[in-house]
Image: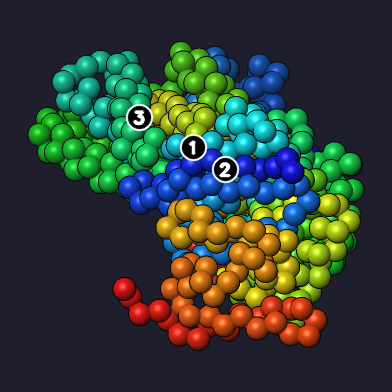
């Protein structure tokens, strides 16, 4: 299988704080991949390096076999959409304008308001059920609405890879289900490759084709949930004892039992 | 487009008032026909007043444009050229020149040198891991501003009566030195800095949501930060060099304009430039008219107008 994204020995840090320490990981086209790991294990950093928000200090990242660092930034921005965990909007901005920004890498000198841009933005907002919020100030939206506006933005970007940082954190059960429904639908319709960070072990097991378990900036295990998520790998990743239960539909549930005593 | 036209109209009215109002009132119709009571005296006043109005307009446009761009770049509605230490550096440069007895013609150059030292210094101190850290730009700017204020007070305290008076007038902002030459000297700085910022407008829209946002959407953020920061410093340094320290314009004008046209930088930047020019021309009219024949420092007028207006804008948006 040829890999769409491949990291080899990736090293990155925030100032003096190391975040990735020789990460090897690969993602195939069309997959949904979950990144799991403790706080500070490098999950979000990995997304930021792929989105070219943070430059790696060593290692290579390949997109379709080519080093990402040798590609023009605008080109990678057309192919990779990044959805942050949260955005603190200081200035008022209408939701439609926020979605339209996703067209910036496609436009001339980053402007984005051709009729075609507007059509794509509105279509994406309709698909994510936020069309009625288009003229509202995005900074005044609820958490769930904001998430869906940002998903619409990723959709309008027409990128083949989506990077989602904790897309379900802070959502109530109904908004969480709605969000996941929208995500599954657009993934199915567009065959988008999705890489998402989550602390919901069960969600990773159910939604992802493959999981990547991170610890201290390195990969501990990767593979389909059934193989990669075992009591042992979960113990190594999260320092917890976990039971894995499989119900009659074959759905796997992970029950954290107790923290592992420090060795 | 409508907003740009409205701001241009406001500026035109301000310019007309700026030319007509002063120690000697000149009806615009007399000026047009070249007749009337004032006669030759009118033309003499005009030759002083037109450069003064032009200088006020340019300085106002420079400061408002720099403020608007810095607010978007730093994603901070309180950012302005004065907060970042640029004008402090300019003030110290000019004060030293005055203290050393340099001719008034040298002051703008000294002020500009001071502004350059300050902004390059802030930009270098704000580097972290090879990048310009925007949080640090703000903090280092504040520190630079405090440091330059101390220097300024020191220079001021040892200056002779005459030099101190000249410094003081300059620290409070003044257009009294306006001349056609000064307007022509300021023009290229305003044009270069203004063009750089206007061309960055779409990128600044992405920065206004966040630096990460701009990077993830394909902007070469390090390059953009350098261009915008240096262009804003150029505009501020040039404005302060020719008119002294005129506060509140860079902070207030983008706020007021944003409340009307929204935060799309492609509209906000040009409208802010026009509105800033209009505001400073009007402030200059007031500074000449309120205590005529004495003149108020224009910095005092902008602050007196700006502070309550700013408070009103904040209360309204809350």
Q: Is residue B200 left or right of residue A10?
A: right
The correct choice, above or below, for A60 with respect to B93 in the image is: below
Inter-mark Cα distance, 3 to 1: 33 Å
Q: Are marks 1 and 2 in contact (CB under 8 Å)?
A: yes
Inter-mark Cα distance, 1 to 2: 8 Å
* Mark 1 vs 2, N-terminal side: 2
- Chain to which mark 1 belongs: A
Q: Quick one: label 1, few (<14), some, or many (20+) residues within 10 Å?
A: some
Q: Quick one: label 2, few (<14), some, or many (20+) residues within 10 Å?
A: many
- Visible residue check, residue A98: no
**Do marks 3 and 1 both belong to one polypeptide chain?**
no
Q: Of B291 and B131, which appears nearest the observer? A: B131
Q: On the image, numbered disc 1 is attached to which residue?
A: A59
* Quarter of the view holding residue B11: top right
The correct choice, above or below, for B177 with respect to A5 in the image is: above
> What label sits on residue A7 in the rendered view?
2
The correct choice, above or below, for A237 with respect to B108 in the image is: below
Query: Element type at marker 3?
Result: helix
Instruction: Residue A137 in the image: state x and y as whole percent.
Output: 71, 63
Instruction: Residue B133 in the image: state x and y as whole percent.
Output: 41, 43
Instruction: Residue B294 in the image: state x and y as whole percent.
Output: 37, 38
Query: Element type at marker 1?
Result: strand
Q: Of A81 and B250, which appears nearest the observer? A: A81
Q: On the image, numbered disc 3 is attached to which residue?
A: B120
- Chain to which mark 3 belongs: B
Instruction: Residue B217 in the image: state x and y as whole percent.
Output: 66, 42
Q: Of A187 and B192, which appears nearest the observer? A: A187
Q: In this view, does B54 lie to the left or right of A40?
A: right
Q: Quick one: label 3, few (<14), some, or many (20+) residues within 10 Å?
A: some
Q: In this view, does A101 lie to the left or right of A23?
A: right
């Amino acid at each position: 299988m040829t890999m769409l994204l491949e990291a080899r020995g990736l090293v990155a840090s925030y100032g003096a704080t190391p975040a990735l320490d020789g990460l090897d990981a690969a993602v195939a086209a069309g997959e949904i991949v979950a990144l799991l790991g403790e706080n500070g294990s490098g999950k979000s950093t990995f997304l930021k390096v792929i989105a070219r928000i943070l430059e790696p200090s060593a290692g290579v990242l390949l997109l379709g076999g080519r080093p990402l660092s040798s590609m023009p930034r605008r080109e990678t921005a057309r192919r990779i959409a990044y959805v942050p965990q949260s955005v603190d909007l200081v200035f008022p901005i209408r939701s439609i304008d926020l979605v339209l920004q996703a067209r910036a890498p496609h436009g001339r000198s980053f402007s984005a308001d051709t009729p075609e841009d507007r059509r794509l933005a509105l279509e994406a907002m309709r698909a994510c059920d936020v069309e009625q919020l288009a003229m509202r100030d995005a900074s005044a939206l609820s958490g769930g609405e904001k998430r869906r506006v940002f998903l619409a933005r990723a959709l309008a970007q027409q990128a083949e890879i989506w990077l989602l940082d904790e897309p379900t954190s802070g959502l109530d059960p109904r908004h969480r289900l709605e969000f996941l429904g929208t995500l599954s639908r657009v993934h199915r319709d567009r065959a988008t490759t999705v890489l998402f960070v989550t602390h919901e072990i069960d969600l990773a097991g159910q939604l992802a084709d493959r999981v990547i378990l991170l610890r201290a900036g390195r990969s501990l295990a990767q593979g389909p949930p059934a193989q990669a998520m075992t009591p042992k790998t979960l113990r190594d990743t999260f320092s917890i004892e976990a039971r894995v239960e499989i119900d009659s539909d074959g759905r796997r549930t992970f029950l954290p039992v107790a923290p592992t005593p420090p060795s | 487009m409508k907003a740009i036209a409205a701001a241009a109209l406001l500026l035109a009215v301000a310019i007309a008032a700026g030319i007509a109002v002063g120690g000697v009132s000149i009806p615009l119709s007399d000026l047009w026909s070249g007749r009337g009571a004032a006669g030759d005296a009118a033309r003499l006043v005009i030759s002083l007043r037109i450069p003064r109005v032009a200088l006020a307009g340019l300085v106002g446009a420079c400061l408002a444009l720099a403020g608007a761009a810095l607010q978007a770049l730093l994603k901070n509605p309180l950012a302005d050229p004065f907060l970042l230490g640029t004008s402090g550096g300019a003030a110290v440069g000019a004060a030293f020149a005055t203290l050393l007895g340099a001719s008034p013609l040298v002051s703008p150059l000294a002020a500009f040198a001071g502004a350059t030292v300050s902004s390059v210094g802030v930009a270098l101190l704000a580097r972290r891991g090879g990048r310009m850290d925007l949080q640090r730009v703000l903090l280092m700017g504040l520190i630079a501003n405090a440091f330059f204020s101390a220097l300024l007070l020191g220079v001021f305290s040892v200056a002779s009566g005459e030099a101190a008076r000249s410094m003081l007038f300059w620290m409070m902002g003044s257009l009294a030195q306006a001349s056609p030459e000064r307007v022509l000297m300021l023009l290229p700085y305003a044009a270069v800095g203004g063009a750089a910022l206007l061309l960055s407008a779409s990128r600044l829209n992405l920065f206004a949501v966040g630096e990460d946002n701009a990077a993830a959407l394909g902007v070469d953020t390090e390059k953009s930060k350098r261009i915008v920061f240096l262009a804003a410093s150029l505009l501020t340094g040039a404005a302060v060099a020719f008119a002294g320290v005129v506060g509140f314009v860079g902070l207030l004008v983008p706020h007021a304009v944003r409340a009307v046209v929204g935060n799309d930088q492609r509209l906000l930047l040009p409208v802010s430039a026009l509105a800033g020019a209009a505001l400073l021309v009007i402030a200059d009219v007031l500074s000449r008219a309120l205590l005529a024949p004495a003149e108020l420092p224009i910095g005092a007028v902008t602050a007196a107008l700006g502070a309550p207006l700013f408070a009103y804008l904040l209360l309204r948006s809350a």
